[in-house]
């Protein structure tokens, strides 16, 4: 059987040097950082990606190891394996680049939890990071990459270095990339349970899988937080091995963030026409690459606790864009009605109480499942 490398885990990252910050990054010096991931799909071997997309200096990695996760920061020592890069155990990742490990030649099943432990001997400076990693990470002084557990470890709530994984799977394996904002990334779902709506949707599939390239706070039209979707589509979607479908949710932060923190000035949300034009340009770009493109309505957020986010102007634009998405003039191959899946029937601009994470802007695990269950699987013919 002929095989090829397919993306099996992805982590979209934010530039820590942005001016507009909802989340703070950090650096590491003479520390081991242990982070976990869950494979969306399995294969006969795997390789790990480590990135330095937005670092100001080359990223020095003194050692890297891969193991099956047990619980928390624990690993199964029988599976502990050094990662090498062109045969070397140490590697330097240049600014703006990533490095891919040599293959680890062992079968890995879909759903397996792994840890990647990196020893960082020098001062990294602020690192490229994600606000919502798969689970809490851990940091300890010195080189503890092979330690079975990390007593007295510092918990690290953010993800770092854009850790990704590819698996060697049968040629012709196809995947979807979930692309967008916090509703894609899974903000407010339970860490470590893989309960974002793309992950829960992936568990409904009978073939192929979904990798997550969501960024909490991300926008369609404006940089910060993270490059806007139209700017990061090449790197975060089109470059992914095996991608055939794209599932998009975006627009909430285009409408809400200008009222929360007016960056850039003036603090006005885009018009419906501007969002429609942006979504059309995104769909056209993806179609030109031969991909199937699935859009989604913008989720409800009336009454959110974040001051200035919920405005009458933004709500009117959301309704107008959603009407367009539910009509017959949009450019997508299909549309998921995310808003209807979680809206309060008595107040459709609000999230249903049982699906509300508590902030009025994000859904909880049950809400993410409701969205996943609302997707017509015929749209994801992987």
Image: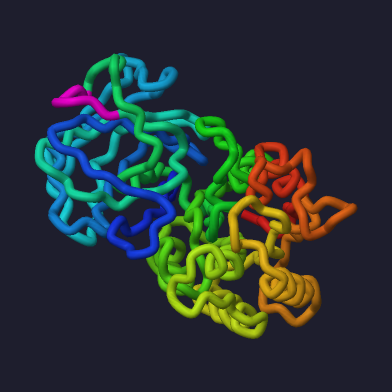
The quadrant where residue 240 appears: bottom left
Is residue 161 in view?
A: yes
Above or below, 187 against 153 in this view is below
Judge by depth and name the residue closer to the eye, 78 or 297.
297
The N terminus, quarter of image: top left
Q: Position of residue 215 (x, y in %)?
A: 47, 55
Q: Residue at x 31, y 42 (%)?
A: 48
Give the residue at x 60% y 48%. Answer: 198
Quadrant in which residue 282 is drawn: bottom right
Residue 317 spot, x, y in % from top left: 70, 75
Q: Residue at x 59, y 38 (%)?
A: 189
Question: In the image, which residues are magenta?
Answer: 139-145
The outermost residue toward the right is 346
Indicate left or right for 161 with 318 as reference: left
* Image quadrant in which you'd find residue 122: top left
Q: x and y percent of residue 87 in the render?
A: 13, 39
Q: Position of residue 340 (x, y in %)?
A: 80, 57
Residue at the front extreme of this rendering:
307
Residue 1 seen by the camera: no
Q: Is 371 one of the magenta-colored residues? A: no
Q: Quadrant of the C terminus?
A: bottom right
């Amino acid at each position: 059987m002929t095989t090829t490398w397919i993306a099996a885990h992805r982590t979209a990252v934010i530039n820590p040097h942005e001016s507009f910050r909802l989340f703070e990054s950090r650096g590491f010096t003479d520390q081991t950082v242990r982070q976990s991931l869950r494979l969306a799909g399995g294969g006969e071997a795997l390789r790990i990606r480590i990135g330095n997309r937005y670092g100001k200096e080359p990223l020095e990695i003194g050692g890297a190891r891969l193991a099956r996760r047990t619980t928390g920061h624990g690993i199964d020592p029988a599976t502990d394996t050094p990662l090498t890069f062109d045969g070397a155990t140490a590697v330097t990742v240049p600014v703006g680049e990533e490095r891919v490990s040599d293959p680890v030649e062992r079968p890995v099943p879909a759903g397996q939890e792994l840890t990647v432990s990196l020893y960082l001997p020098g001062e990294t400076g602020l690192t490229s990071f994600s606000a919502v990693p798969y689970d809490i990470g851990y940091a300890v002084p010195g080189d503890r990459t092979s330690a079975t557990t990390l007593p007295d470890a510092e918990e690290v709530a953010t993800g770092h270095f854009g850790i990704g994984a590819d698996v060697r799977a049968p040629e012709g394996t196809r995947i979807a990339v979930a692309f967008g904002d916090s509703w894609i990334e899974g903000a407010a779902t339970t860490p470590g349970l893989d309960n974002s709506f793309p992950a829960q949707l992936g568990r409904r599939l009978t073939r192929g899988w979904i990798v997550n390239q969501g960024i909490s706070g991300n926008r369609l039209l404006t940089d910060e937080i993270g490059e806007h979707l139209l700017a990061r589509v090449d790197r975060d979607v089109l470059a992914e091995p095996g991608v055939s479908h794209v599932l998009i949710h975006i627009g909430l932060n285009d409408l809400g963030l200008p009222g929360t923190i007016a960056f850039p000035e003036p603090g006005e949300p885009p018009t419906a026409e501007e969002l429609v034009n942006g979504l059309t340009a995104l769909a056209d770009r993806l179609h030109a690459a031969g991909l199937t493109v699935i859009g989604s309505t913008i989720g409800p957020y009336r009454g959110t606790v974040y001051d200035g986010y919920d405005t009458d102007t933004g709500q009117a634009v959301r309704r107008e864009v959603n009407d367009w998405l539910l009509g017959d003039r949009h450019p997508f191959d299909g549309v998921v009605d995310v808003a209807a899946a979680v809206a309060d029937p008595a107040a459709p601009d609000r999230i249903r109480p049982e699906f509300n994470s508590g902030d009025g802007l994000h859904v909880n695990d049950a809400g993410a499942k409701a969205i996943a269950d609302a997707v017509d699987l015929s749209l994801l013919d992987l």
